[in-house]
Image: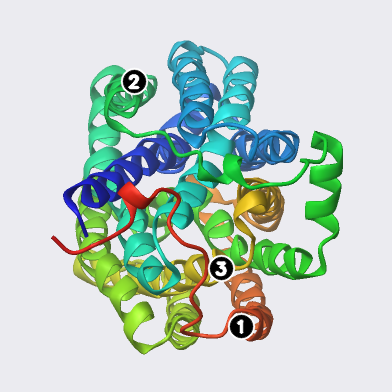
Amino acid sequence: MSSYQKFVVALLAFLQFTVILDFMSLSPLGAVLMPALHITPSQFGLVVSVYAFSASASGILAAGFADRFDRKKFLLFFYTGFVFATLLCGVANSYPLLLVARMVTGVFGGVIGSIVFAIATDLFPFEMRGRVMGFVQTAFAASQVLGIPAGLFLSNLWGWHAPFIMIVAVSMAVGIVIAVRLRPIDAHLRVTGRRAGAFRTLSATVTNPRYVQAFATTVLLATGGFMLMPFGSAFTVHNMGIDIARLPLVYLITGCCSIFTGPLVGRAADSFGKFRTFVFGTTLGIVMVLIYTHLGVTPLPLVILVNCVMFVGISSRMIPSQALMSAIPSPETRGSFMSVNSSVQQFSGGVASVLAGLIVAEGPGGVILHFERVGYVVCAASLVTLFMMNGIRRMVPEGRLVTAPARASDAPAAE
């Protein structure tokens, strides 16, 4: 890669870090926030999922316009709204206000991920996207290593509002870098021919048979994380017997492991085949989810080991699946496809979070009951996804070269 491509990958990864951190920050705060606001597990599940529902609606509305603007300007608009909405979360002082703030955050934050993946697909060819997606996905792990432990530490010192204020400060710095350093990404605007209206563009996107198959696959891909994450911290503290003061250590070590393995998974996807890597990740993920959701009181080293291996399985599913799906849309409809796909992911994730909240119950002392049933649902969804992803593989043969980079000056090249 050229120095600029390396900068773009790093910027996209850090951008994703701030957005994912904002979403994930609530999950580990569950053990603190539920007693602080006097809310039940089902209410907490709604706080988590309302972000996904509003992000889903926003993604659908943005799909008709996603390919009509320079992607840099489109990104800056939604990122600015995301920063202000996160600030609203930081000043909320009641359950209703927090619920509204999370809804507004989802409206802006939910579209950013689709823009990030559209940019990555514009600027890098298919045979490199495994590596690119691998690095971008390290944002998920970095939010565990840096953000979540820091958020838990700040919440222990100054309350659960503090992590959101931290996210605002970091996000403002990222926004400045985007405005100053990122070049325009507008090659899709130079495609010849008359453009359809926003409604017709959206209609064509959601009725394209190839796209519909990809959207259906995304529905089940989102199930695992959204069902397990909202109650992960409470399950670790109350069921596994890990002291809440040691919870940041679990996230820290698990995140370090994911940061190390994410780029390796991306390289493996490019070298050995994206679908083969996905099969490996699905198999490993099913085994580890079954083990994880059946754990009782467990020593800290074993808790960390199980979490690390489980997240390797999750990375080995998400990275190759994103790389495969990135080859499906044409350049002039890429933004619309990514927006709808993100919307579908957020909505299905919100449903999964609510479903998890209905399955589990809070027992004496905060113990999470019936968590193993959530594991069964996640594993069943993973098996179905495996067959659906095979259909995606048939649409996108391994080794296929798709569209050229968006600008000749931005084309990946060795220096």
Circle 1 packing at 10 Å, graded few (<14), some (14-19), many (20+), is some
SS label for mark 1: helix
- Quadrant for the N terminus, please: bottom left
Task: Find disc 3 in the rendering and name its residue.
Answer: 327
Residue closest to the far left: 415
Q: CA distance from mark 3 to mark 1?
A: 18 Å
Front residue of 79/127: it is: 127
* Residue 221 place in picture, x, y as percent: 60, 66
Q: Which mark is residue 386?
A: 1
Instruction: Measuring from the top left, give residue 228's x and y in whole percent.
Output: 52, 59
67 lies above or below 249: above
Asked which secondary structure carries label 3, the reply is loop
Of the numbered discs in the image, which one, if any, rests on residue 159? 2
Left or right: 83, with 345 as reference point:
left
Residue at 30% across / 21% down in the picture? 176
- N-term mark: 3 or 1: 3
Return the x and y of residue 282 as percentages of the image width and height.
Answer: 50, 81
Amino acid type indicated by mark 2: Gly
Left or right: residue 388 compared with residue 407: right
Residues at marks 2 and 3, CA–CA distance in whole angstroms: 44 Å
